[in-house]
Image (cartoon, rainbow, N blue to C red):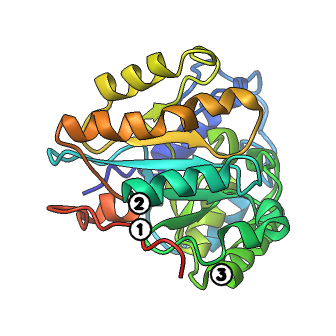
């Protein structure tokens, strides 16, 4: 069972978020200077894309930060890859630990590094994270659909499976992003716990303890498999995080398994290379 947010609520949150660059839909309560006076642009940016409402196919687009459940199941997610530095390391660990995960891939990265993941994603899930990690909230509907569509086709070509999940880069949501997600049949996935890669850059043990002590049932955990060296704090501690959560009785799932409850009572292991 998920925690969807109504379209009206999310669009309102997107408008409120226009005053700053927070890491999520409701990351700021600063009102944009045009709020209540001048009309915002309706074809892009943080606007509600009101001139494109004829594109709406459903009454709401699910936007999930976590899944409401009492089952001790969590989902690891990895953003921005694939890349030659960290993605193979992450896949090796997940395969060894028999843990499924969801990778929100950047289309341009996948085009350049398809061989890194081809045949290694059985048991895992791949979601759409834009073509080049653009801030989708600054684009209009046509631009977003072209961007996500290009990435969608790349994911389908490489993995053989069409993605059903979207994570907008930076967690930024504008109205046009929601309309594009609606038109493409995507659920939007954000997160309830993010790795503190800067805070624990030189202390993997502290990052492990923070995850193990603070993650709750139904959590969607944000990590990265591409970036600078501070991201290694997650990878160096990943096996210990998995062990610590297992000691607390947790199981692991892809995001879609978490939403559907398919991960209970057991955790389907990744299939490794095919």
- In three-dimensional space, the C-alpha distance between marks 1 and 2, rounded to whole angstroms, equals 5 Å
Is the residue 22 above or below the residue 168 in the image? Answer: above
Image location (x, y in percent) of residue 67:
30, 48
- Contact check, label 1 and label 2, Cβ < 8 Å: yes
Q: Which residue is mark 2?
A: 100
Q: In the rendered structure, which disc, 1 or 2, sits on the residue that comes first in sequence? A: 2
Q: In the rendered structure, which disc, 3 or 2, sits on the residue that comes first in sequence? A: 2
Please tell me which residue is depicted at 77% across the width and 38% down the height of the picture: 39
Residue 270, numbered label: 1
Q: In the rendered structure, which disc, 3 or 1, sits on the residue that comes first in sequence? A: 3
Q: Nearer the viewer, residue 29 or 51?
A: 29
Q: Quadrant of residue 38?
A: top right
Is the residue 260 above or below the residue 189 in the image? Answer: below
Relative placement, left or right, of 139 versus 31 is right
Q: Disc 2 on helix, strand or loop?
A: loop
Image location (x, y in percent) of residue 175:
65, 51
Relative placement, left or right, of 122 versus 31 is left
Q: Which one is in front in this view, the residue at disc 3 or the one at disc 1?
A: 1
Please tell me which residue is depicted at 74% across the width and 58% down the height of the picture: 106
Residue 156, numbered label: 3
Q: Disc 3 on helix, strand or loop?
A: helix
Residue 79 appears in the rendering? yes
């Amino acid at each position: 069972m998920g925690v969807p947010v109504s379209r009206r609520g999310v669009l309102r949150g997107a408008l409120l978020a226009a005053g700053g660059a927070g890491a999520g839909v409701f990351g700021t309560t600063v009102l944009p200077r045009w709020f209540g006076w001048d009309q915002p642009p309706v074809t892009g940016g943080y606007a509600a894309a009101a001139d494109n409402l004829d594109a709406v196919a459903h009454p709401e687009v699910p936007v999930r930060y976590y899944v409401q459940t009492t089952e001790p199941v969590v989902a690891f997610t990895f953003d921005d890859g694939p890349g030659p530095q960290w993605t193979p390391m992450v896949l090796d660990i997940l395969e060894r630990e028999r843990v499924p995960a969801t990778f929100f891939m950047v289309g341009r990265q996948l085009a350049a590094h398809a061989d890194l993941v081809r045949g290694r994603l059985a048991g895992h899930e791949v979601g759409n994270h834009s073509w080049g990690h653009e801030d989708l909230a600054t684009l209009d509907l046509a631009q977003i659909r072209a961007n996500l569509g290009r990435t969608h086709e790349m994911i389908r070509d490489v993995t053989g499976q069409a993605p059903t999940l979207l994570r907008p880069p930076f967690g930024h949501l504008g109205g046009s992003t929601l309309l594009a997600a609606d038109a493409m049949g995507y659920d939007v996935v954000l997160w309830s716990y993010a790795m503190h890669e800067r805070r624990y850059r030189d202390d993997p043990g502290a990052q492990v303890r923070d995850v193990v002590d603070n993650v709750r049932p139904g959590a969607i955990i944000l990590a990265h498999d591409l970036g600078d060296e501070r991201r290694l704090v997650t990878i160096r501690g990943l096996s210990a995080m998995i062990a610590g959560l297992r000691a607390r009785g947790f199981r692991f799932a892809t995001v879609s398994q978490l939403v559907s409850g398919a991960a209970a009572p057991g955790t389907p292991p990744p299939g490794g290379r095919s």
